[in-house]
Image (cartoon, rainbow, N blue to C red):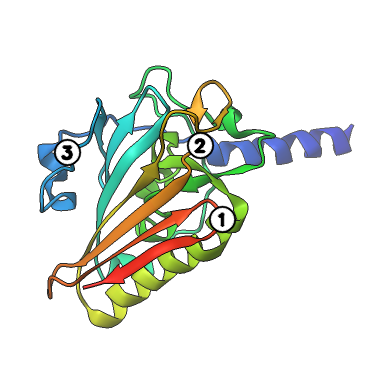
Amino acid sequence: MKKIITGLLLVLATTTVFAWTQRAPGTVAQCQVHAPYGVPQVQGTVQPICREAYLVGYDAQVKVPRFVMWTLTPGHALGCVGRSNAFAADQSVQGGATPADYAGTGYDKGHMAPDGDQSWDQQVEYESFLMTNMSPQAGSLNRGIWKLLETSVRGWAFQGGHNFNIVSGGIYSQGDKVIGKGVVVPHAFYKIVIDENTGQYAGCSHTQHHILTWATI
C-alpha cells in the first residue's frame, strides 16, 4: 500500500509541473517592442496573439504560426529558468493545435520563439510552450541546425551587448503533409535576425532536412 501511495504522489508531483495558469493575451500595441519594424503583411488571415515575450501571427486554418516575432536582449539571452516542457493548447484560440496532434507522428513540437530565449521568467518560459508557438519539425532539424542557430543568436546578443529583433515561421502551401487534426507540416522554415544597434541583419531558410540559403548583410 505504501508503494502505491508513493507512486501516486510521484505521478501527481510530475503532472503539477504542467498545471500552469494561462494569462490572456495582450493587445498588438502592447507587443510593439517585438515588432519595431511593423507586423509582416501576409496572404490570408492570421490571428495576432501578443505574449509578454513574443508576438504570434497564427494561421488557425492550418494550426501553425505564420510568423513569431520577439526581441532578445543581452540579459534575456542568459536566462536561468529550467526547461519545463509544459506544452499546452493555447486557450485564446478556438480549435488550435494540441500536443496530442503531434503524438506518434515522428515530428517534434518545434518552437518558433525558442524556450532558451524565454527562460528569464517562469511564466514567460511556460508561455513559450503554448502550441501557437509550435510547428511540426523533423527531429534532425529541430535538434540539429535549428537548435544551433538559436544558440548562436543568444551568443551574438550576449557577446555584442545588443538587442536583436527576430522573426521566425514556417513556409507551407497546398499539398504539404497534415498531422493530427489538421496541423500542416511546413516544408521549410525561415528566420530573420536583426541587430537593433547596427542595423545588420541575417536571414536563413531551411527545408525540413537541410539548409537552403543563408545571407548576412
Q: Are marks 3 and 2 in contact (CB under 8 Å)?
A: no
Image quadrant in which the N terminus is located: top right
Task: From the viewer's side, name the closer residue of 130 and 21.
Answer: 130
**Image spot of residue 214 (x, y percent):** 36, 67
Look at 44% across and 56% down and name the residue there.
206
- Residue type, numbered disc 1: His
Q: Answer yes or no: is residue 80 visible.
A: no
- Residue type, numbered disc 2: Val
Dot 3 or dot 2, earlier in sequence: 3
**Image spot of residue 41 (x, y percent):** 17, 38
Q: Is residue 80 left or right of residue 8?
A: left
The furthest residue to the bottom: 159
Dot 2 or dot 1, earlier in sequence: 2
Task: From the viewer's side, name the closer residue of 126 and 31.
Answer: 31
**Image spot of residue 86 (x, y percent):** 52, 42
Dot 1 or dot 3, earlier in sequence: 3
- Check disc 3 and report the residue beneath it: 41
- Check disc 1 and report the residue beneath it: 209
Q: Secondary structure at mark 2?
A: loop
Question: Which mark is on residue 185?
Answer: 2
